[in-house]
Image (cartoon, grey):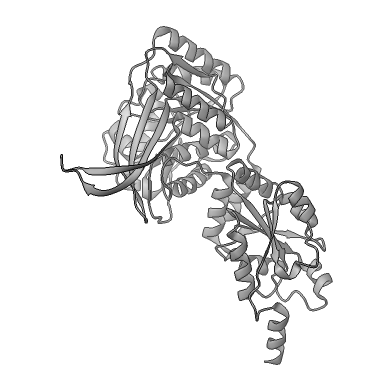
Amino acid sequence: MTSDLLRAIEELPVPEVLVVGDPILDRYVSGTVERISPEAPIQVLRHDREYESLGGATAVAANLARLGARVRLAGLLGDDAEGRRLRGLLKDAGIPDEGLVAEAGRPTTVKTRYIAASQHARQQILRVDRETRGAGGAEAERALLGAVRAALADADVMVLSDYGKGSLARCATFIDAARHAGVKVIVDPKGKDFARYRGATAITPNRSEAGAATGRAVVTAADAAAAARDLLEKLDLETVFVTLDRDGIFVLERGGQGAAIRTDPREVYDVTGAGDNVIAVLAYSLAGGLSPVTAAFLANVAGGIAVERFGVVTVGWDEIAARIAADRGGDAKLVDGALLERLLESARHAGRRIVFTNGCFDVLHAGHVDLLRQARAFGDLLVVGLNDDASVRRLKGAGRPVNALQARAAVLGGLASVDYVVAFAEDTPKEIIERVRPDVLVKGEDWRDKGVVGREFVEGHGGRVELVRLTEGFSTTDTLRKMRGA
C-alpha cells in the first residue's frame, strides 16, 4: 500500500481549485501565566507577542497552495482594516484575492486566540470571535456569484468551506453552477441542515456534524456507515467522508460497501485547522482522478500531521510522503524521478531548508549515523544520495558493495534523521546535487583538502557547504578488516 500511495502522489496532475467560503483572520495573542487575578478567579496572561494567519476558507486555500494547486478564492469579507490584512496575507502566500467581495458595514471575521505558553507546551485558554452570520446584501451577493461563475470556467474542483458566516448563503446556486460547468464540488459542512448541499459530489462532516444532520449518534465506524448512507441518499451525493478525529476517516461511495481508514495513534497537540488540511488533500486528490479511498488515506495522513502541531498549519506533499515512508520504514524512503521533484518543490514552497549529503553507506556504522545526524541539524529535510551497486564497485573494487542498493537504502531509511534516499549511478554526485538543488551540502571534514564536488553549484545558487567532524575509530574499511580477521 505504501508504494501505491507514493506512486499516486507522484502521478497527480496539478489541479485548478476554486475555494468558496468564509474568509477568517486568525489572530494569536501569546504569553505566560504565572498567577491568578485578584479581581476574579481567572488567569492573568502576561503578553509576549501577537501574530496573524489565514483562517477559514483562506486556510483551505493556503493548504491547497502548499500542495502546489493553482488556487482561486471567493467569499465575503468586510471593507475594513482586518480585511486588508487578510488580503495582505493572501498576497504573501501567492493566492489571488480578486474573488473576495468586500462589503461596507460587514466586519471581517476575526478569531482571536489567547495562548498560555510554558517551556514544555502551549495551551489555548480563551477565544474571542468578532463576526457576522448573515448573508450579504443583494449587490454583494451578485458580485460573489459572478466571481464564482467566472472562476468555474477553469476549475477542476470547487471546495465549499462553510464556517456559517454568510458567504455560502447561496451555496445551492453555487453547486448548481458547478454541475452545469462539469466541476466536482466538495463540501466542508456546517450546522444541522445539510439540505443546501444537495447535489454536491462529496461532503466531509465530522462525527458530530454527521450525527446532528442524520439524528444518529456517531461513535463507531458502523455508526458512521449508517449516517453516510443516509446522507448519500438524502443529498444525492457520490461520496461521503465522515472524519472521526483520532479514529480516522470513514468513506462511503454510492453503490459501495464503505471503508474505515484508520489512523496511527498520535499525540494530539492542537486540532485547530486539521479539517482544512483534510479537505484540501481530498480536493487535490479527487481532482487528480484518485479513488475516494486513496484520497482518504492521503488526507488522513495530512490530518495526523496537522494535529501534532500548534495553530493553523499547512501540510505539503513532502511531509505526507515522508510520513508514509517513515511509517513503513526501510526502502520506502528511496524515491526518484517525478516524485522526488514534486516533494522537493513542495518543501521549497514552504520555505523548508533542504540538506544533501552522499556516500556508499555500504556497512553502516556509528560514524555514518553521527554524520547523518549532524547533517539533518542544518535544515528541515535531509536527502541522502546513495551510490548504486555498479558505481560502488568502480569506486571500492571487487567484492563491494557488501550490501546491495535496496538493502543499503532500507538501513538508511530506518534512521529518523533521513527523509529521502535517492540513488545515483555516476562516479560523483554532481548530477544528483544539481537535481536536488540543496540549500546546504554536507560532507565529512576529511574532504576539506579534496575539493567538495558540487560546491560551486550550491554556492552559486545561494547555498552553503558544511564540513562536519567525523567520529573517530569508525570506518567501513576497518569494519570489514575486523570481520575478515574474526
State the residue at coordinates (78%, 70%): 392
- Residue 254 percent location from the top left of the image: 46, 35
Which image quarter is the C terminus in? bottom right
Report if residue 1 is visible in the image.
Answer: no
Q: Residue 233 is drawn in which quadrant?
A: top left
The foreground one among 55 and 220 is 55
Against 46, residue 381 (above or below) is below
Number of dots carrying numbers: 0
Q: Residue furthest top?
A: 139
> In which image quadrant can residue 110 be found?
top left
Q: Residue at x 46, y 21 (%)?
A: 75
**Residue 184 in view of the camera:** yes
Q: On the rendered image, what quadrant is the N terminus found in? A: bottom right
Q: Is residue 428 left or right of residue 212?
A: right
- The x, y position of residue 68, in whole percent, is 60, 37
**Position in image of residue 5 (x %, y %):** 58, 50
Please identify the residue farthest to the bottom as the structure is shown: 486
Indicate the position of residue 399 as horizontal and vertical percent values. Answer: 79, 79
Horizontal side of 413 relative to 312 (left or right) equals: right
